Image: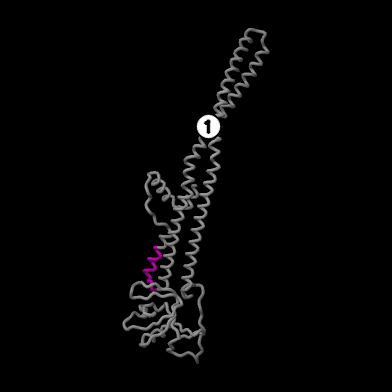
Amino acid sequence: MKQTEVLLQPNPNARIEEFVYEKLDRKAPSRINNPELLGQYMIDAGTEFGPGTAYGNALIKCGETQKRIGTADRELIQTSALNFLTPLRNFIEGDYKTIAKERKLLQNKRLDLDAAKTRLKKAKAAETKASQLNSARLEGDNNMIWAEEVTKSEQELRITQSEFDRQAEITRLLLEGISSTHAHHLRCLNDFVEAQMTYYAQCYQYMLDLQKQLGSFPSSYCNNNQTSVAPVPSASSNVIGSSTLTSTSGLVIASPTNLNDLKECSGSRKARVLYDYDAANSSELSLLADEVITVFSVVGMDSDWLMGERGNQKGRVPITYLELLN
């Protein structure tokens, strides 16, 4: 039971605090757990970097996932405490203590019974020896003394035997209830295992969703160990001031020159969204990865932003989230 408590709550100070509140019959104050704390720090850091930046947005998504893991961890602790630890603790502090006490009394009664049998055996041996030596008066008196000792030992043996039988019956009745107790705690153990299965399944699903979200980011943001090397154009094909870098798929990567040309012109262009973006306020437009929207520039707008349009929805979108199309 102690090791289960350590597993669910590794902090010894928190366990002592919960124990004190439990003994005082008061509800312990809510305490933020480590995943929730980490998630909050990630969200705060992502907000400082800016939700419109790739790294800031990724930090916020990781923080939200950590908070969900913290909530699942809290549910695991509550479920395990209710369905497993509390019944086990009640048994150990209640029935188990009673059984241990009665078993100890039975052991003491057995020792008393063994001692009474030993005294009777010695008294009978002495009586037999005294009866063989009946030639003198002293030996005759000694024979009567040992006869009285035998009678006394037999009476004491009957009393100790009766007490032992009564204590053995009490202990037997208590131990008979162990089978039903075992069945109950087996169900509690199954509940504990199911709670762990649910917890780990939730954590796996949360991290899988997070991995998919981070996978929608450009590879240059997601994998620092892999860098894409663009082929060096030949001198004949290298044109100074070129506005686009054309890929074999027909997409146009948004280079700084290309974006400047877009801002200088008054027309609009189609752009593919590279990864999800959640609008920070009503002036921005939320984006979904791989969707195609219309973008255009607005005079006086920040150089890192464009105006995006999807149907009748319109708002600012970050340039780094876009890939311009031909």
User: Residue 154 occupies which quadrant of the picture?
Assistant: top right
Task: Report x, y in % for residue 56.
Answer: 40, 70
Task: Report x, y in % for residue 167.
Answer: 54, 31
Give above or below for 235 relative to 183.
below
The residue located at (43%, 70%) in the rendering is 58
The residue located at (38%, 80%) in the rendering is 311
Image mark count: 1
Give above or below for 106 relative to 280.
above
The residue located at (66%, 13%) in the rendering is 131
Residue position for label 1: 105
Q: Looking at the image, which is closer to me, 82 or 48?
A: 82
Q: Which residues are magenta?
A: 40-52
Near mark 1 (Cα within 10 A), the count class, few <14, some 14-19 or many ≥20, is some
| Quadrant of the rendering where the C terminus is positioned | bottom left
273 relative to 142 in the view: left or right: left
The residue located at (39%, 63%) in the rendering is 41
**Which secondary structure lies at badge 1?**
helix
Q: Is residue 48 magenta?
A: yes
Task: Report x, y in % for residue 210.
Answer: 47, 67
